[in-house]
Image: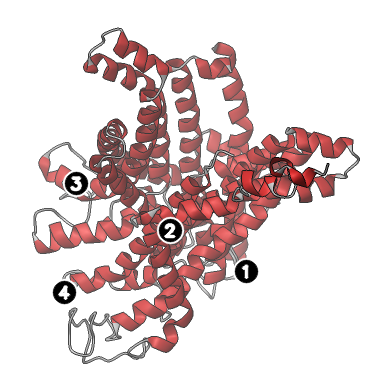
């Protein structure tokens, strides 16, 4: 008597009927994220801003650097200048579009760099523990003892104005918080049974970190880092607003806001436009990061 | 409790030394001669050496650091290169102005933050919650220097209700709590309060929602306690964290007031820092950063101590 005679015991047919392959973690996260309307709107805005940053210079209606003494500080809705002109008669719409490039670059780069350096420091401190942990984490505590705005401004003030110095200062500001998160997540993961099992089976420290630790810590650190982009946008533009970041005549929203400050009595709403762009950008990044965090809180 | 207090203080000391070292080192990151802003281009070699000795720039870094810390402990932060006045006096005067602004802003932020947070936490996922949550995201996302500009445009330039800049009709030295002075405080304080409002609202909302879902609340309700009674229990559980966040926010505002003070020409530490940076006045820069950072460290310590008094579970763990 063969097994095939009894269909309920067919080993080939049974699994397909009973089990459905459960979606992986990232598929679940993506699905949850797509269902979050607010996060999706924010994602679309961020995507548009990034496209504007990439292609801005080729799609502007006018030359963003061309000034004209005759058409200074025109109001919003002027013929030929849909969003008015700035204090040198340059087209605001074009400048805001081209400004996306430097503003986003100045806001995102420090967080990315700090993500790499801070994660490395936190992983090292969390995995090595002991003496190395003490040295790294106590040094980080010192930088953490400064309010972030003060540290950013003090550093770039001491180093002098300029794009590179502003990026450097902001990176230094964001390393401590990221390293702290990385350290605490790594310490948690290090104590898990699977890490112990890998060690017992003879895996070296490098292999354990690469195979078992990295994949489990980078997600939470990344989500935390995305929440810093909004702060970084505000701070980076703030540095330019103070005259410590981007220098004229480059279009950058913080700098534009600064040079237009004198116009708040003559053309107030034109003067406020660059700040509105910073606001929209930082708000979108905040909502995107919130959505990402909620979507990733999946109980496995 | 006493042991915890002792541990916290001992832990803070090396941090303070580190903060002093960073504040000192910051200034020496600066490229160029620290005396370049005061020395005339044709200064004689003799005068240069004389000034260098006067400010102590001729000695080695460790020596300079040691003597700077030693004098700072005695309340002497050196003399400003640009104005020739005592740095400690300048900083103290500015700290008073900033503290007043930051304190009022924190109170406004705390009040509205708690209000929004409680309402949102109580009516979770309703439209009230969504509106309150949106407001708190706006609070943490808005570039406050831009918000300040917008408020100046609306209330000073357009409506002409409030003054746009300054700390009073007669400058900054003679602050009084009357309307003539307070109306200068309104716009900067409201601008500044938006950040703590957003952060406190977020914290309180999460706490309230968490506490309301706990079993002891169900127990209290089952026991027949009124809504007001339950509310008081929630307040009691939220208070330690909310107060701690408020304390830290005061510290952040104090250190981060430079952008708002620049917008409103408010004569505080931010404006002082701004002029120190652009005049390359290193002793003043160093001193202001040190005082602000130390204040932040001490505030952190104070917050920890107060929090552990309110909630003894913290010092026991």
Q: Which residue is depicted at the point 47% across and 37% down?
A: B296
In the rendered structure, the residue with mark 1 lies on which chain?
B
Residue reaching furthest right?
Answer: A202
**Corner quadrant of residue A47:** bottom left
Residue B312 position, x and y percent, is 49, 14
Give residue A118's position: percent from left, percent from top. Answer: 64, 51
Asked whether the beta carbons under mark 4 and mark 3 sit within 8 Å of each other, the answer is no
> Which residue is the extreme one toward the front?
A1
Residues marked 1 and 4, same chain: no
> Disc number at residue B186?
3
Q: Quadrant of residue A271?
A: bottom left
Q: Is residue A158 left or right of residue B217?
A: right
Residue linked to disc 2? A285
User: Spatial distance from mark 1 to mark 4, Cα to Cα?
Assistant: 51 Å
Res. B45 mark: 1
Chain-order first, disc 1 or disc 3: 1
Front disc: 4 or 2: 2
Residue A266 - label:
4
Q: Chain of mark 4?
A: A
**Within 10 angstroms of label 1, few (less than 14), some, or many (20 or more) residues?**
few
Near mark 4 (Cα within 10 A), the count class, few <14, some 14-19 or many ≥20, is few
Secondary element type, mark 4: loop
């Amino acid at each position: 008597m063969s097994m095939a005679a009894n269909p309920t015991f067919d080993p080939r047919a049974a699994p397909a009927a009973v089990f459905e392959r459960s979606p992986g973690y990232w598929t679940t996260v993506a699905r949850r994220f797509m269902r979050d309307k607010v996060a999706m709107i924010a994602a679309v805005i961020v995507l548009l801003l990034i496209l504007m940053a990439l292609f801005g210079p080729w799609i502007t209606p006018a030359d963003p650097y061309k000034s004209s003494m005759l058409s200074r500080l025109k109001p919003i809705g002027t013929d030929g200048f849909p969003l008015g002109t700035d204090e040198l008669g340059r087209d605001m719409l074009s400048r805001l579009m081209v400004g996306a490039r430097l503003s986003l670059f100045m806001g995102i780069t420090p967080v990315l760099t700090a993500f790499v350096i801070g994660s490395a420091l936190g992983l090292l401190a969390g995995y090595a523990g002991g003496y190395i942990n003490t040295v790294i984490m106590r040094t980080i505590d010192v930088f953490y003892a400064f309010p972030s705005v003060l540290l950013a401004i003090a550093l770039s003030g001491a180093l002098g104005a300029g794009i590179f110095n502003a990026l450097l200062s902001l990176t230094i500001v964001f390393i401590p918080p990221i390293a702290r998160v990385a350290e605490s997540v790594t310490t948690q993961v290090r104590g898990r049974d699977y890490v112990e099992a890998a060690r017992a089976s003879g895996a070296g420290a490098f292999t354990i970190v690469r195979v078992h630790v990295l994949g489990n810590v980078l997600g939470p650190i990344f989500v935390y880092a995305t929440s810093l982009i909004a702060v970084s946008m505000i701070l980076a533009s703030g540095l330019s607003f103070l005259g410590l970041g981007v220098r004229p005549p480059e279009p950058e929203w913080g700098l534009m806001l600064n040079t237009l400050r004198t116009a708040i009595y003559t053309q107030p709403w034109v003067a406020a436009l660059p700040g509105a762009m910073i606001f929209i950008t930082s708000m979108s990044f905040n909502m995107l990061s919130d959505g990402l965090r909620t979507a990733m809180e999946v109980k496995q | 409790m006493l042991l915890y207090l002792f541990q916290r203080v001992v832990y803070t000391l090396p941090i303070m030394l580190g903060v002093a070292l960073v504040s000192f080192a910051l200034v020496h990151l600066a490229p160029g001669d620290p005396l370049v802003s005061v020395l005339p281009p044709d200064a004689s070699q003799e005068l240069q050496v004389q000034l260098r000795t006067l400010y102590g720039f001729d000695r080695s870094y460790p020596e300079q650091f040691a003597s700077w810390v030693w004098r700072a402990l005695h309340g002497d932060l050196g003399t400003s290169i640009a104005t020739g006045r005592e740095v400690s006096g300048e900083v103290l005067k500015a700290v008073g102005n900033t503290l007043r602004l930051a304190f009022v802003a924190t109170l406004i932020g705390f009040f509205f933050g708690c209000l929004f947070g409680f309402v949102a936490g109580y009516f979770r996922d309703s439209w009230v919650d969504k509106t309150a949550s949106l407001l708190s995201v706006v609070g943490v996302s808005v570039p406050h220097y831009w918000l300040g500009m917008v408020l100046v445009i609306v209330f000073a330039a357009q409506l002409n209700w409030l003054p746009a800049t300054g700390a009073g009709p007669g400058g900054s030295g003679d602050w009084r709590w009357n309307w003539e002075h307070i109306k200068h405080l309104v716009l900067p304080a409201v601008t500044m309060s938006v950040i703590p409002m957003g952060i406190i609202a977020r914290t309180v909302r999460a706490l309230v929602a968490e506490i309301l879902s706990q079993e002891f609340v169900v127990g209290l309700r089952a026991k027949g306690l009124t809504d007001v009674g339950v509310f008081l229990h929630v307040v009691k559980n939220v208070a330690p964290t909310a107060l701690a966040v408020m304390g830290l926010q005061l510290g952040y505002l104090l250190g981060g007031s430079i952008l708002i003070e620049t917008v409103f020409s408010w004569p505080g530490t931010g404006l002082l820092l701004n002029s120190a940076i652009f005049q390359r006045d290193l002793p003043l820069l160093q001193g202001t950063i040190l005082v602000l950072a130390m204040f932040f460290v001490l505030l952190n310590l104070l917050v920890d101590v107060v929090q552990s008094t309110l909630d003894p579970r913290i010092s026991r763990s």
